[in-house]
Amino acid sequence: MQRIVVERAGGAPVTRRAHVGAVASGNLEVLCEPPAGAGARITVETSVDGYEPIWRATLERFLERNPIAAAIEINDFGATPAMVSLRLEQALELAR
Amino acid sequence: MPVLGSRWNSGAVDKAERLSAIAFALSGKVLNAARLVDVLELLIRPGDRVCLEGDNQKQADFLSRGLAAVDPGIVHDVHLVISVLGRPEHIDLFERGIARRVDFSFSGPQSLRLAQLVDDGRVEIGAIHTYLELFGRYFVDLTPKVALVAADAADAAGNLYTGANTEETPAIVEATAFRNGIVIAQVNELVDELPRVDIPGSWIDAVVVADRPYAIEPLFTRDPAEIDDVTILMAMLAIRGVYEVHRVKRLNHGIGFDTAAIELLLPTYAEELGLRDEICTHWALNPHPTLIPAIESGWVKSVHCFGGELGMERYIAARPDIFFTGPDGSLRSNRAFAQMAGLYATDLFIGSTLQLDRDANSSTATRGRIAGFGGAPNMGSDPHGRRHASEPWLALARADDGIARGRKLVVQLVETFRSSGVPTFVERLDAADMAGKAGLAIAPVMIYGDDVTHVVTEEGVAYLYKADNVDDRRAALAAIAGVTPVGMERRPELTNVLRAAGVVAYPEDLGVRPSDARRSLLAATSMADLVRWSGDLYDPPARFRSW
């Protein structure tokens, strides 16, 4: 298990809670909700250790594309970066 | 009429001698199965070139098991020519010293053992071929002395019925029979009257009834239940960014879930886009079960097949307007002709791979395995020469000087990472370091980057054929390569320039919303759905049934 946190200042807050995906092999769940403070904070719990740079690059690119303020929790079970990005987009679609 | 024994006819003399040596086991053309090993020991001489019919679908496994049982003191140093080294006994031939040299195309399941034998110096690899190249060489400098093939049935005259799984039998038999080689066919049964004749009996020297039906793999069956949202997103991008843009009508799909997803989106997503009759009408394709919904929805005009597919027989027989079928109603496949069609008659090949470098060179060879490629290097190439100017082919012409020719679309469809931590886009292919170790003259590259016109990932489409120079080409690939080592070289300002020039397209440029990518878009989400679409004519193998 590894825990990774990525934060970014500013951005428009999401308005609703959203939950997509599931914790299953090669998949992940994403919980997205309005932020407690300002800015975005993404917390990842992943079952696969050792890929922190890939996680950081994936999450930073997501926040670059979508300058939001939100509290996002990710529970990962070996998803690919493509699946991570897609679930984030799906969660954001519901939370905006 | 040539005279036996003349100096121009040594092949016929040799053949007559060998056949007389095995006459004791023959009754007419029917060989006594119990004497198979004795016959092979008398028939095959050290150093002979022997073709064993074995491809990624059907395998002449009764004959290959027989060959692996001969005494290596009698039969040794055979030069094996074979499409797919797929069965354990193929490798046993080298371990036992029966065979010494091999020319082949693909070794999927045996790729680890083969690499080990090469390391141990027990096998010499002539070359790793494509199917067409190997078939071509059967007619030039790799003509078999003995061919061991498989058929569904034979009659007493040696006529063969190969049915849905005709595949490469005609190519092997023609090359051998017309050069005074000896052809033995294993058959599932002997019958008085064949449903149709696929190979004439005068080309066949002996038929033998096998102990069990020839081995065959349902290689092209993909369970829709395993298609995930990312794969669906990539399929949406391929449909809008490649098929719709170029009006791709004549095509081949690789094996894999990525292209299966495209097939399952035709009657739903592509239908809503109004693309029926505009794309995907004529196919060079194995009988993919995932194409059933598109066929049933009226999307498909014709399908010519490389081989058969287990479980699809009844469905195909009931759709003779779509598939190539014989007067008996069953499919006639032919790998050589389908490969030829893929080279010269299709607008597009699309398939997946395990590794792509920054120049879009692609390979499925990874460390410790010598796997080969089968047909993909031919399907995934532009044969460059003259061909008919279909609309998509012509649209890729670069110059407008009155002479310019077009290009076949060669598309690689890949997710940026194969699994968490394993990037598809790499700085150097594993294949680049493998040639020396395996004693190969060239690296096992599957598709050369200069033939690749488009790359599609979950991030978008790179129109590589539009890039003006190698730097732009690499930048276009980096722009859709995600957070892989290649993708981390992305420069946002250059990406914007390339997007404006149409060299790179992101989902929003193509009208695709990633959050729309959901399994509910698939025309079928399970094997049971495919069976329903087929009107219960499709009969999936047991391993694909959950009911």
Image (cartoon, coloured by chain):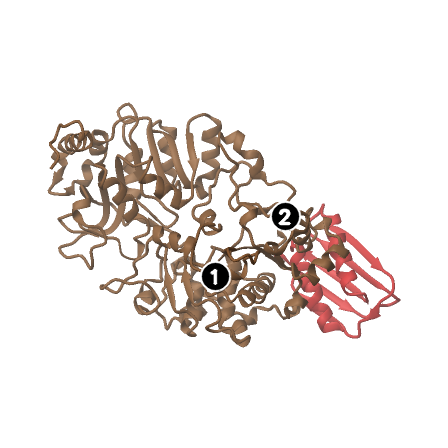
Q: Is residue B488 above or below residue B147?
A: below
- Look at mark 1 in the image and give the residue it sits on: B223
- Look at mark 2 in the image and give the residue it sits on: B425
Label 2 chain ID:
B
Chain B colour is brown
The image quadrant where one finds the N terminus of chain B is top left
Residue shown at 53% from the left, 30% from the top:
B436
Q: Is residue B494 above or below residue B240?
A: above
- Callout 1 amino acid: Asp
Where residue B438 appears, as percent x and y from the top left, is 50, 31
Chain A colour is red
Q: Is residue B440 above or below residue B164?
A: above
Task: Compare marks 1 and 2 and give the one earlier in the sequence.
Answer: 1
Is there any visible trace of residue A37 in the rendered image? yes
Residue shown at 42% from the left, 68% from the top:
B292
Towards the viewer: B175 or B31: B175
The Cα–Cα distance between marks 1 and 2, rounded to whole angstroms, is 27 Å
Classify 10 Å Cα crowding around label 2: few (below 14), some (14-19), many (20 and above): many
Residue shown at 51% from the left, 35% from the top:
B442
Task: Tell if the residue under mark 1 belongs to the same chain as the one under mark 2.
Answer: yes
B154 with respect to A92 (left or right): left
- Callout 2 amino acid: Phe
